[in-house]
Image: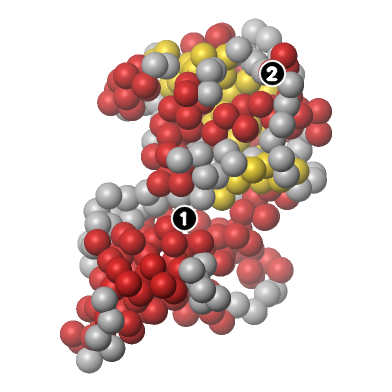
Amino acid sequence: MSLTTSPATQPASVGVIGLGIMGSAIAANLIKAGFDVWGYDPLPSARTQLKKAGGHACKSVADVAQHCQHVLLSLPSEAALAQVCDELITSASKVLIVAETSTLPELAKKQAQKFLLKQRITLLDCPLSGTGAQALTRDLAVYASGHTKAIKAFAPIFEGFARARYDVGAFGNGTRMKLVANLLVAIHNVSTAEAILMGVRSGLDAAMVVKVVADGAGGSRMFQVRGPTMVDRSWEKATMKVGTWQKDMRLINDALEATQTPAPLFSATVPIYNAAMALGHGQDDTAAVYAVLERLISKS
């Protein structure tokens, strides 16, 4: 879907709560797009980074809400969402539209939506498809769900940090769509490692494998994004940490069980990601599954 909106409707300011890998990249791109960005994160270093990028570092969630009618959330957990909601509902003095972009349980988001309505705060469920590296280059897709008019009001902001927006219907559909996408990410990430390792062990240059295969029928977006990281062995520069990805894996598994969907390929990836955790790659990028497969060779 094209992200075209009249410049006259563009909000002057936008808040970003949660300035981690994704949130900081989103905030930086919004600043480049001309928005006045007000952000908060409990880590002082994250607030300092925002200030260096040209944004306003706030001391609290309440401070952000006082300056912005449109607020983006990029949060690590259900507990963080609940805490932010508590602070928003006790501090907001005006009508707010809040876009929740994290990958969290649908039930938690629906509970937050109902809770925030008490204070005339509209919550949108808008997970993002893309890695932290893709966020830096504005190569994200927004799966927007919820109140139609609120999504339209947020459209210029989405355009400021994403290449595409898909309006997928009722609140919660965004999360469901994200889990479908992440199921494929889980599989394609491991299959990328398998393919590159097979090429290397057959005598091919790893970088050449990535360049050639990514351009053919066997390529995938994960092959393009994670393949170079596997070749360079630079997974310590995480754009999606293995430890964080474990949360997404659990959510996918819960959705599969709830829908009674057979998923043999996804199931086959679970031990690989668990092994990455066991081998100490929790803070590394999920491209570290390549190291896990290498380790399996040495053990055979």
Query: Label 1: few (<14), some or many (≥20) within 10 Å?
Result: some
Asked if residue 139 shows in the view, the reply is yes
Residue located 67% across and 55% down the image: 177
Residue 118 placement, left or right of 55: right
Mark 1 residue element: helix
Amino acid on which the number 2 mark rests in the picture: Pro
- Would you name the residue on which mark 2 appears? 7
Q: Nearer the viewer, mark 2 or mark 1?
A: 2
Judged left or right of residue 4, residue 203 is: left
Rendered location of residue 293, percent (x, y): 30, 78
Residue located 51% across and 39% down the image = 138
Please tell me whether residue 278 is drawn above or below residue 173 in the rendered image: below
Left or right? Give the position of 140 relative to 243.
right
The outermost residue toward the bottom is: 300
- Find numbered disc 2 in the image and state the secondary structure of the residue it sits on: helix
Q: Disc 2, disc 1: CB below 8 Å?
A: no
x, y percentage for residue 258?
68, 66
Quarter occupied by the C terminus: bottom left
Q: What residue sits right under mark 1 in the picture?
A: 247
